Image: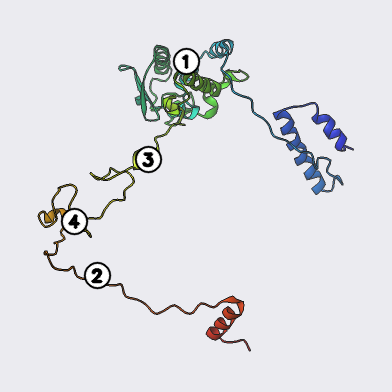
Amino acid sequence: MTDRNDVITHLDTVHGSPRRHTIIALRSLFRWAKKNGTIFKNPTLRIRVGQCEEGVIQALEPEHINGSVAAVTHPADRLILALAAVHAARPGTMRRLQLEDLDIGNRLLTIDGRTRRLDDLTLQLANEWLEFRRHRWPDTGNPHLLINKQTALGTGPISKSSVAGPALNGKTATLERLRMDRQFEEALVRGPDPLTSPRSSGSVRRPRSATRTRPRAPGTAPGDRPRDFTTNPQVHPLTSTSCAQNPSSCRGISPAPRGTASPPRPRPPQGPPPPPRCRGTAGFASHRWRQIGRPG
């Protein structure tokens, strides 16, 4: 029979994420056993999982990068590795790349609508992959840049597991670490400004104020509210003339002649007065019973 001490003794042998996953699995197992009457007491009660503190991400060592580079041998995997390490592209972004996004003649690459120059390494690996793709699947109609033997017969992208394949399993320099290392290097060179980091990461977006700010009228301060010249026929700021001299600038409103008072504005029609507000529970009840009748 397993008791609480046995569970704690086993948990002392694991640390970090394995310990957290073990506690969750044991809780689920003993909760099911207690529900079905197999045991009388759950030994995992009041055993806290605790918080898993993430370590500070550091730059990758050269041997880690060299190990990942030596592990990939397929032309498609080598191109994927370059897109992550040089252009900080995410796996989902690489899966969506089209053939028209790669311009070999002009050395341009479009990632998520942003065009960038191709470096020598990425250009060389892209040429190798296109040559392999042309010889391996000469009659494919798939418009995606990265394809395999499954997607070559259709028009869809490759799967998530096909991005770099199992070549980087167990490696320290994974695609995500290579992408983050590229951003970390960019931050060290240009400073921690998100607008100067590689934009293919998807984390940099145009500020909302840059697309929704309307231009101010001439002669107004940034904090002034826009004036409505249709109801106030004064001097127009765009023509510097009065509405009497330039009636077209007042949107068809003819100004009143000098010395005459403007006609009063019509008041909106008023409906019936609202019912009197009852104060307190007793008042509300009496008013309600007068409307629907007191129960007999």
- Residue 208 relative to residue 268: left or right: right
Q: Nearer the viewer, residue 262 or 90?
A: 262
How packed is label 2: few (under 14 Cα within 10 Å), some, or many (20 or more)? few
Name the image quarter holding residue 61.
top right
Q: Quadrant of the N terminus?
A: top right
**What amino acid is labelled 2 in the image?**
Arg
Give the label on residue 75, or none.
Answer: 1
Q: Note whether 185 is above or below 5 in the view shown.
A: above
Where does label 4 land, which residue?
234
Q: Note whether 73 is above or below 29 in the view shown.
A: above
**What amino acid is labelled 4 in the image?**
Gln
- Residue 230 relative to residue 56: left or right: left
Residue projecting furthest to the front: 259
Do callouts 2 and 4 mark residues in contact (Cβ within 8 Å)? no
Rendered image coloring scheme:
rainbow
- Residue 217 relative to residue 55: left or right: left
Where does label 3 land, which residue?
209
Count of all numbered marks drawn on residues in the image = 4
| Residue at screen point 25% across, 55% down | 228
How packed is label 3: few (under 14 Cα within 10 Å), some, or many (20 or more)? few
Residue 110 place in picture, x, y as percent: 37, 25
Q: What whole-number distance in Å separates the C-alpha atoms at marks 3 and 1?
A: 43 Å
Where does label 2 land, which residue?
265
| Residue at screen point 15% across, 59% down | 252
Residue 251 place in picture, x, y as percent: 17, 56
Q: Nearer the viewer, mark 1 or mark 4?
A: 4
Q: Secondary structure at mark 3?
A: helix
Q: What whole-number distance in Å separates the C-alpha atoms at marks 3 and 4?
A: 31 Å
